[in-house]
Amino acid sequence: MNFPRRAALALPLALAALAGPVAVRAAEPVKIGFLVKQAEEPWFQDEWRFAEQAAKDKGFTLVKIGIPNGEKMMAAIDNLAAQKAVGFVICAPDVKLGVAVNRAAKRHNLKVMSVDDQLVDGAGKPIADIPHMGISGYEIGKQVGQGLLAEMKARGWKPEEVGVLRVAFDQLPTARDRTLGAVDALRAGGLPASNVVDAPQAKTDTESAFNAANIAFTKNAKFKRWVAFGLNDEAALGAVRAAEGRGIKQDAMLAIGIGGSQTALNEFTKPTPTAFYGTVLISPKRHGYETAVAVFEWATQGKAPPPVTLTSGVLMTRQNQAEIRKQMGL
Ligand code: FCA
């Protein structure tokens, strides 16, 4: 009499125990991390915004973490694993951390894809099994140089009289590609190689570019007119602010950035034009949305992203900004 009663109680309990974890698992949304090196930079905020859009559209949860250094980066990856995330997109604070990222991802069984800055191994070679989406750095740099040339010509500036300020961050391959593309385009347009002045910045923000440009201007006072560029809008803007501080204004200076996020838009909406002439607008929408979806589909459907995807850009100035942003779906 006792036995069947106990069994009758035990059976539903056993079933519940079996069903429990499954039911819980089904209700928990899939988590994807999105780790960026400079969370305060408008470009990365835009990327996050579009990744959030992807999460909403596809029904996963996005975990956004700023990773300003290697230590925070490693902690963030461990944290994602502890939260049972299935993968992450990353723009690392230093591309040489590639091997560490790959190892941590494998250890935790997380899918990983890089965005913007391609991760490299100890020898500086891109890590082949981490899919990447970035910009076509050299081509976009050439667009910067060509944009500067066109406006120089429109103003009747003589190439030999113009200083070329390259705000440089050569330890980052995409930064080097971008700025060398600009230099090559300017040289092809007749600017002497000896007019190129390198201004190495310590970090990729406006303040570091400002400091680097200041030193370069001091050392090269012989130039009365300048064109300037760097890896992003912040670099170009730092050069513009440093020039202003020395009385080199919009009529004697031209800078073109890369990005097209709020940093550039703020300049364009100022009542008086500054020397920040334009920017090559790139796509935070593609970089944020598509990478997040790619990692989601890779982790949940086994569909691996293409090894490398490079996106293009378009020159945007104060004049055509509204139209161009609309065309790019921003
Ligand atoms: C790099 C730069 C960012 C942005 C991005 C596309 O990560 O540091 O400013 O230009 O590439």
Image (cartoon, grey):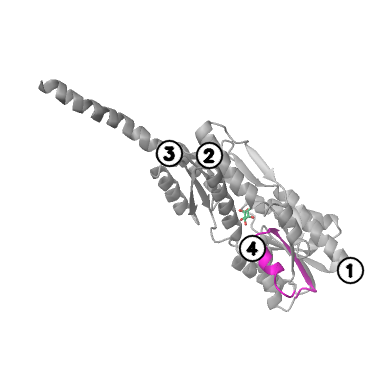
Q: Secondary structure at mark 2?
A: helix
Instruction: Please state which of the two labelled residues, at mark 1 or mark 2, is closer to the viewer.
Output: 2
In the rendered structure, which segment of residues is drawn in magenta? 249-272
Q: Nearer the viewer, mark 2 or mark 3?
A: 2
Query: Of the residues under marks 4 and 3, which one precedes in the sequence?
Result: 3
Check contact, mark 2 vs mark 3: CB within 8 A. Answer: no
Q: Secondary structure at mark 1?
A: loop
Please tell me whether mark 4 or mark 1 is closer to you in this view.
Answer: 4
Badge 1: residue crowd in 10 Å (few <14, some 14–19, many ≥20): few
Tell me the residue at 50%/40% (across/down): 102
The spot of residue 214 in percent (x, y) is: 66, 72
At numbered mark 3, what does the secondary structure look like: helix, strand or loop? Answer: loop
Q: Earlier in the sequence, mark 1 or mark 2?
A: 1
Which disc is residue 296 wearing? 2
Checking the image for residue 108, the label placed there is 3
Quick check: 248 above or below 119?
below
**Residue type at numbered disc 4:** Gln
Q: What residue lies at 41% left-to-right and 36% top-to-bottom? A: 26
> Gap in Å between the C-alphas at discs 1 and 2?
52 Å
